[in-house]
Amino acid sequence: MTLLKLKYKKLLFVILAIGFASCSSPWDDKENTGDENLNVTLNEAISTTPETAEFGKLLSQTGYDKILAASKTYTVFVPTNEAMKAVSTTLLNNPEALKKFVENHIALTSFSSVRNTDEERIQMLSDKYLTFKGSTTIGDATIVTADHYAANGVYHIINKAQAPKLNIWEYVNSQAGTSSMSNYLVSLTAFSIYKSDADAKLTSTPGFLADSLSNSYLKNVYNLNNEKNSYTLFLMEDEGYDAEVIKMKPYLNKSTNDPDIDSTAIYSKYFTVRDMVFPKAYTKEELPDELTSRFGVKFDVDKTKIVGEPIVLSNGIVYIMKKVAVELEKRLVTTIIQGEKNNGGYYGFRSRMLYRDKKEPLSELLTSGQLYNDLMVELPNLAKFTLFYRANDMFSTKYKIYWRAINDRTANLFEQQLAIGGEINLTATGFPVENITKTFPMVIVPLNNYEEVEIGEFQYNTAGDSGLISLIGGTKATSALTLDYLRFVPEVKN
């Protein structure tokens, strides 16, 4: 019995030993190595290491010696003394710039060279981000020796100092005096492309999101002032930029009451430059042969038109381009209006409107049908039940109009028609739309037809708002009404 108890005691000791070992932290493991730096702060370790003493002097000069002696955990990417020789004396002699320089080497929390991700963007105390690639690269520097642990963090010794770079928006501003495209982008801080831009600027306050509300391009395309994300911008030289703008002018005819404002030129420029930025930093090797903008415009990337080397910035890459030629057929994107998004309202009873989630029937190839949403009014109890729609960004050209209207509920054929233009008279008795510009003929909606139907053509002489678009039901109170989508396809002028 005594022998058995002794065996249990030995087993318990082994289990406890394993448990204590499994609860030890990597930091504890570092302590067991006898590394003397674990007994000193980051500031002390960096300043007393001969290879990094020059950067240590800057820590004292800027007050970051005290910060790196505090109890918080930091990561410092420390340039070698040799790397510090390449730093501009102008920067070193400017107290504000020097502080930002030091901050751009320090991150809050600990980042080891052994990580779960191959690439990680790390926010530095400068509010800029550096990309930590693999275990050997930070920004555009190589890590000479990694994972030097101290009592309050870790530091890595690098072969190149990381002075803060401009971000893309700061770079655009710096080029405004010499680049027509840059000058235009900056001008959209004063000029609002949409009414919602002007409203946002009036209500914006300093701080969170203020930068994205201060400029129509930042608000509606991408916020190139955002340090957290990465972008690629094609910045065209004046000749190529002007040529693309001229191509767009016939399709962006705009009127204005101010003789000093050329609205056609302003909007032609906007619809040229909005397709020139992408939400990823493409290196020259990664740059694809074709890109699609967030507005659905596709174009070929002609790498022979790149001028010089890519400009690497804190939140992406800028390519200076002789030109970026985009075919008009691709630039003039189709407008699709979803049936369930009748943001213009309706004429009838809301209770009769069915917003549906549907699935197409199996095709002839027995593949799964596509999911879609639509709107149907099966029993309107009102003649000429009407759904109202609007769209922005119509070009000044002729459009071919199609709809997909799916009747999958009633064998009784019904008619509906489209009308463009006019105003809603809320005081009218009966059908409320007055002064319609064009009414298309009634179209029969057959049972279970999932194909598009061509409705006709409409000419927009002025670019911008579509005007009121009305989908009108039949003249009988029992006539149904349905719409999956409307598709407006712009034509290229001869």
Image: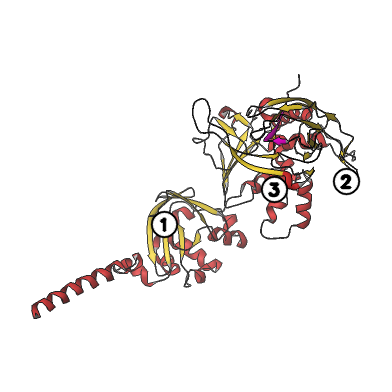
Relative side of 118 to 191, left or right? left
- Please say whether residue 398 is one of the residues in the magenta stretch: no
Residue 425 in the image, given as x and y percentages of width and height: 89, 43
- Do the residues under discs 2 and 3 have CB atoms within 8 angstroms? no
What residue is disc 2 on? 426
Q: Residues within 10 Å of mark 2 (few under 14, many from 20)?
A: few
What secondary structure do most residues of the magenta stretch adopt? Answer: strand
The image quadrant that residue 22 belongs to is bottom left
Residue range of the region highlighted in magenta in the rendering: 481-491
In primary-sequence order, the first of circles 1 and 3 is 1
Residue 197 position within the rendered picture, expressed as x and y whole percent measured from the top left: 76, 48
Q: Secondary structure at mark 1?
A: strand
Expressed as whole percent of the image width and height from the top left, the position of residue 189 reads 75, 48
Residue at position x 40%, y 50% from top? 136
Which image quadrant is residue 471 in? top right
Front position among marks 1 and 3: 3
Mark number, residue 157:
1
Q: What's the amino acid at mark 1?
A: Ile
Q: Which residue is mark 3?
A: 219
Q: Which numbered disc flags the more N-terminal residue, 2 or 1?
A: 1
Q: Which mark is residue 189?
A: none
Q: Nearer the viewer, residue 421 or 218?
A: 421
Q: Quadrant of the C terminus?
A: top right
Measuring from the top left, give residue 279's x and y in whole percent: 58, 43
Disc 2 residue type (three-letter) = Leu
Q: Quadrant of residue 261?
A: top right
Q: Is residue 329 above or below residue 195?
A: above
Decide if residue 32 is in sight here. yes
